[in-house]
Amino acid sequence: MTRLRRWGCPDTGRLEKRQQRCASLAAALAGMLAALLALACPPAAAQDPRIDPDHALPVLSDTPRPPASDDERGLRAGTMAARLAACTGCHGALGGGSADGYFPRIAGKPAEYLYNQLTGFRDGLRPYRAMEVLLAHQSDAYLREMAQWFSAQAPAYLAPRSTAAPSQALMVARELVLRGDASRGLPACVACHGAALTGVLPASPGLIGLPHDYIAAQFGAWRTGTRRALAPDCMADIAAKLRPDEVAAVSAWLSSQRMAGAPPPEPAPEGKLPMACGSQPGPHAGAGGQP
Ligand code: HEC
Ligand code: HEC
């Protein structure tokens, strides 16, 4: 069952819910097979974009934007949209998230963040079977193209889930997210994830649109060392400082927030981050200012 839980089938909850989840597991497996087939077709465009009229990658830019044409959105053979359609079987249309209760939204996240995750799955920094199998033999260049494509999508956010968490817990979570806890060296989450939690360039992800179970699982993975980023791994340090009840509260609060429109990540900060994060390239790595 532990294995199933990692596929989005938690062993808690009513039987009916479990059956629904396991139906989504079957859909996920089918999606993965289709994804493997689609990805196996060599991306001609990646070899030489100039000679492939079907090469429909959006112009590379830091600002996510909706697809420009029906061709980009459509499934014309050979386009990135067609090749990545199977990813969206799990991650939702254009990567916008799924009602499944586990698969994360990936649309509009900074390309550098997505690229770090894709290479992390491929290279064993972030073990997760479905993603490892899909990405095992993909080149850095193709992973970068995937990251740029999903980063440039801006589908509307799904409606947030309601939460049964007590209001006291939600207040604790809100305080941590907006203000942190200086007495424990915990900076506010918004200091690195953006005032509206839409993410910050170059490589800090937005936190809205992620399911409760996914967020809680990431904190578990940082604590057990199964999700790692380049050192210094600021999220592993933060996860180690949060109590389990705080992780539950923050997961409930974040997953129940609504996002209007699909705003892009904030530009890179002028100064340093409040803690050093090795995954942030260049001067934004941060050098441990005051939380
Ligand atoms: C079988 C379902 C499935 C398919 C198909 C799939 N993914 Fe995933 N993906 C997941 C799950 C589940 C996670 C979360 C894993 C975890 O808990 O760490 C994930 C995580 C990710 C992440 C990290 C998200 C984040 O916010 O950190 C990225 C990026 C990603 N997938 C991209 C892709 C791409 C690109 C494809 C197609 C090549 C793809 N996925 C296909 C299920 C899938
Ligand atoms: C010092 C900067 C910093 C602070 C403060 C911070 N984060 Fe992060 N967070 C990051 C970075 C950088 C990443 C990307 C790590 C990676 O590349 O794997 C990240 C990733 C995440 C992710 C993974 C998102 C996904 O799609 O998988 C979650 C969830 C998260 N942070 C939650 C939080 C919460 C909740 C707080 C506050 C309690 C917080 N973070 C505070 C820098 C920070």
Image (spheres, grey):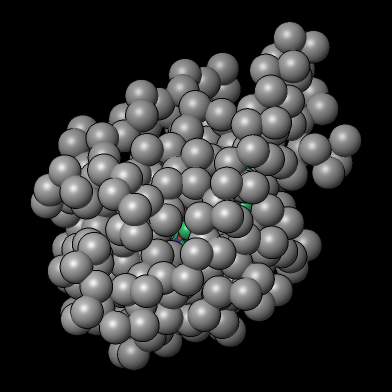
Q: Is residue 280 left or right of residue 5?
A: left
Q: Is residue 254 visible?
A: no
Above or below: residue 29 compared with residue 207: above
Query: To which quarter of the image does residue 290 belong?
Result: bottom left
Q: Residue furthest right?
A: 1
Picture residue at 58% right of the left edge, 41% below the top: 31
For the image, the number of numbered tags is: 0
* Viewer-side residue, 112 vs 30: 30
Residue 174 percent coordinates (x, y)? 42, 39
Residue 160 percent coordinates (x, y)? 40, 26
Query: To which quarter of the image does residue 26 belong?
Result: top right
Picture residue at 62% right of the left edge, 47% below the top: 32
Picture residue at 75% right of the left edge, 19% below the top: 18
Query: To which quarter of the image does residue 267 belong?
Result: bottom left
Image quadrant holding the N terminus, namely: top right
Q: Is residue 198 left or right of residue 243?
A: left
Picture residue at 31% right of the left edge, 58% below the top: 79
Image quadrant holding the C terminus, namely: bottom left
Residue 181 percent coordinates (x, y)? 48, 56
Above or below: residue 37 compared with residue 245: below
* Viewer-side residue, 137 vs 233: 137
Q: Residue furthest left?
A: 68
